[in-house]
């Protein structure tokens, strides 16, 4: 029996966040890029992202990978039903993603699944569908130095992240970035040409949380960068849904007549 001054823990272990790391897996297998990708990302970009999450979050996550070349792009209803947070990297084959899979992911996000579109996923079907804009931007691939500045200190995604993050070589993304006004602006990037870019933004869609993060071109080993790995680990934890969520997307509800009016109609005081 515990004394009044003793505390007795009633906390139950927290279930791990179920993360699916999705990759287009095109550059890893293309004739032009295969040799370079084998050197930069021997396990694929999706493999590097997954390894970084496992490294930093340990048993707080269960991480799986899925790729576009798998049946249903690796995103079957069963996989998505067992995913709390989905990361998405695509670039060269956005148009080949099956609309039925996009609709499935869209519904799951509205129901509460977190989504992390990364780098050129700004042009993915799922991101454009969720944003409702063109999501176009300016770009230049000339090994620019990117400085990623924190503009929302204290936000959970910025915990343990230096400002700026210094990425020695990276593709330049610049404004204007055609996205809806972010709910939260987390990071702002600057480049050697003087360009700026809203490189870390959040939105809520339905019950789901979305974090877009731009660093991560296939030509550079950005996903091995320790500070980038920290951002993604933080973002997974931020985007994860509450365990009480039912993953049912909001829908139109046909409500019965208000009780007061229905009672008056029954009494014959108003017409039905």
Image (cartoon, rainbow, N blue to C red):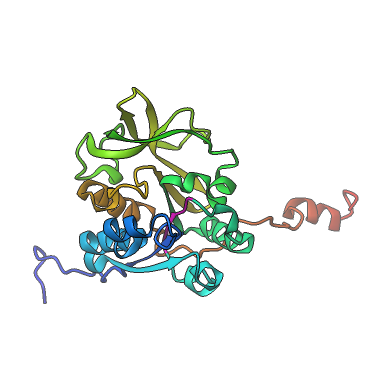
Looking at the picture, how far across and down is residue 100, in whole percent? 63, 63
**Point 33% across, 51% down: residue:** 235
In this view, the residue in front, 259 or 190, is 190
Residue 262: x percent and y percent?
79, 55
Q: Nearer the viewer, residue 39 or 210?
A: 39
Q: What stretch of residues is rendered in magenta?
A: 84-91
The question of residue 242 being in magenta is answered with no
Which residue sits at x=47%, y=50%?
91
Residue drawn at x 20%, y 50% as measured from the top left: 226
Q: With respect to residue 6, does 125 lie above or below?
A: above
Q: Residue at x 21, y 59 (%)?
A: 56
- Where residue 116 sits in the image (x, y, percent)? 41, 52
In the picture provided, is 258 more to the left or to the right than 143? Answer: right
Q: Quadrant of residue 191?
A: top left
Q: Which image quarter holds the N terminus?
A: bottom left
Q: Is residue 199 left or right of residue 69?
A: left
In the rendered view, would you say 241 is above or below 270? below
**Residue projecting furthest to the top:** 194
Asked if residue 216 shows in the view, the reply is yes
The part of the image, by quadrant, that contains residue 171 is: top left
């Amino acid at each position: 029996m515990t004394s009044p001054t003793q505390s007795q823990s009633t906390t139950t272990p927290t279930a791990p966040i179920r993360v699916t790391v999705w990759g287009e897996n095109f550059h890893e297998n293309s004739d032009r890029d295969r040799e370079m990708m084998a050197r930069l990302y021997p396990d694929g970009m999706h493999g590097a992202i997954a390894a970084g999450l496992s490294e930093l979050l340990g048993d707080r996550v269960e991480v799986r990978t899925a790729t576009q070349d798998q049946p249903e792009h690796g995103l079957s209803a069963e996989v998505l039903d067992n995913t709390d947070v989905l990361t998405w990297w695509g670039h060269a084959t956005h148009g080949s993603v099956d609309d039925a899979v996009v609709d499935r992911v869209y519904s799951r996000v509205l129901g509460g699944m977190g989504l992390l579109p990364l780098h050129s996923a700004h042009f993915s079907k799922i991101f454009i569908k969720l944003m409702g804009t063109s999501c176009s931007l300016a770009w230049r691939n000339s090994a620019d130095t990117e400085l990623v500045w924190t503009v929302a200190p204290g936000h959970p995604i910025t915990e343990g992240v230096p400002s700026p993050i210094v990425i020695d070589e990276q593709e330049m993304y610049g404004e204007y970035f055609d996205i809806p006004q972010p709910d939260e602006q987390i990071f702002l990037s600057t480049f050697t040409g003087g360009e700026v870019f809203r490189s870390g933004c959040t939105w809520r869609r339905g019950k789901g949380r979305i974090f877009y993060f731009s660093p991560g071109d296939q030509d550079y080993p950005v996903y091995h960068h320790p500070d980038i790995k920290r951002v993604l680990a933080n973002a997974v934890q931020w985007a994860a849904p509450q365990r009480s969520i039912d993953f049912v997307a909001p829908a139109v509800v046909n409500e019965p007549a208000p009780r007061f009016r229905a009672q008056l109609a029954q009494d014959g005081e108003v017409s039905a």
